[in-house]
Image: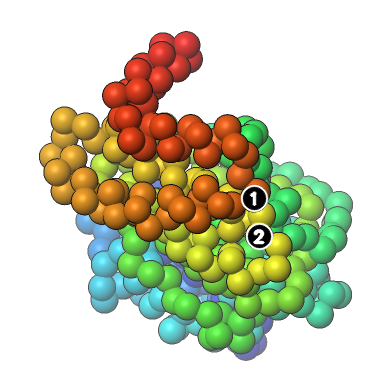
Amino acid sequence: MNGEKTPIISIIVPSFNEEKNIARCLDSILNQTYENFEVICVDDKSTDSTFEIIKSYAEKDSRIKPFKNPSKGVSSARNFGLEKASGDYIGFIDSDDFIQPQMYEFLLRSINENNCEISVCRYEKTSEFNIKNFEYNCRECFAEEFINFYDMDFVAKNELTLTSACMKLISKKLIKKSEKFLAYKIGEDTVFCADIWTKTDKIFLVDCPLYCYYTNLESVSYTEVWHEKWFDLIETRFIAYEKFRTLKNSLTSSFYLERGMKLLLSYRFNIKGTENEKKFKKPIKNYFKKYSKVYLKCSDISLKNKLFISVFRFFPFLYTAFRKMTDNTL
């Protein structure tokens, strides 16, 4: 046990009502082949037994540090965790997910060998708890290799490596130079990671799926897709566009510009007839007005997609017909 040593890695785990999953998450962390870490568990005002489970783990292993979030929300919980972290490097894990045993050994090795401030790994989406072993495989990576304008299956399998805080090990020095997590209910990772990504010269990829994104089809993410909080996705995509514009390569910024524009169309369609239609009518209109010209001038975006956005922006009834037609073919 390395609990008495100064932790090199601080792993921040925000949690809210995860009594069914938190043990699996903590077990996977304690099963790491690299042992010199602390786990900053920040309970976000759970109303179930989540915090009691965390405290029971802390009684058995001094590396587990239980805290209660004085505010509310995953962003504030992570920011609070950053204040409590004493490690040289920071990792994040969502309490309903789990990690493979070699994750932090490989990520720290990548940082040390390549003299960089951040390393990332791949992930897999799973509904089963499977432990696997991998061969270390590392190379330099670039933001644009995780996105694609036309292959959404590719994006679904790769984009989180770019946009999620959870697949990364980041030096505390780099985090101190970057923005904290903003108070979005969803999409906050995209903004945080875009800021991190644009503040460092090199990032290395451990080319193994070491992070396991646990899929729960009954979660809010699947059952309330057009809830009010999902408007945050639009805002965070445009913020990511603005941040990635600072890079010499414009491809990633263009990707988030297009994602933002398409989300505007989709959100406008899906809130029609709901209480959110009136609330978000003006913000949607303002986003279209602000970004339409730069979208049409963007050389990375195809003429076909430019026409798609332009026509459906001004003729919503055509988009309604398009969605009904395409939804019926699924």
Callout 1: 10 Å neighbours few (<14), some, many (20+)?
few
For the question of whether residue 134 can be seen, the reply is: yes
- Considering only vertical position in the picture, is 319 above or below 49? above
Left or right position of 11 against 250:
left
143 relative position to 236: left or right: right
The residue that label 1 is drawn on is 299
Q: Secondary structure at mark 2?
A: loop
Determine whether the residue tagged by mark 1 lies in a helix, strand or loop.
Answer: loop
The x, y position of residue 93, in whole percent, is 53, 60
The residue sitting at 40% across, 20% down in the picture is 322
The residue drawn where x is 51% and y is 50% is 295
| Tally of numbered tags | 2
What amino acid type should be assigned to the residue bearing mark 1? Answer: Ser
Whether residue 6 is situated above or below residue 9 in the rendered picture: below
Residue 314 sits above or below residue 194 on the image: above
Mark 1 / mark 2, whichever is N-terminal:
2
Contact flag, marks 1 and 2 (Cβ < 8 Å): yes
* C-alpha gap between disc 1 and disc 2: 9 Å
In this rendered view, identify the residue nearer to me: 119 or 261: 261
* Residue 142 image offset from top left, x and y in percent: 74, 60
Q: Residue at x 77, y 60 (%)?
A: 141
Quarter of image, res 90: bottom right
Amino acid residing under circle 2: Ser
Q: Residue 302 or 59: which is nearer the viewer?
A: 302
Residue 33: give x, y in percent of width and height: 73, 63
State which mark lies toward you, 1 or 2: 1
Q: What residue is pinned by disc 2?
A: 250
The image quarter containing residue 309 is top left
- Asked whether, in this view, residue 114 is left or right of residue 175, the answer is right
Residue 16, horizontal then vertical, whole percent:
33, 57
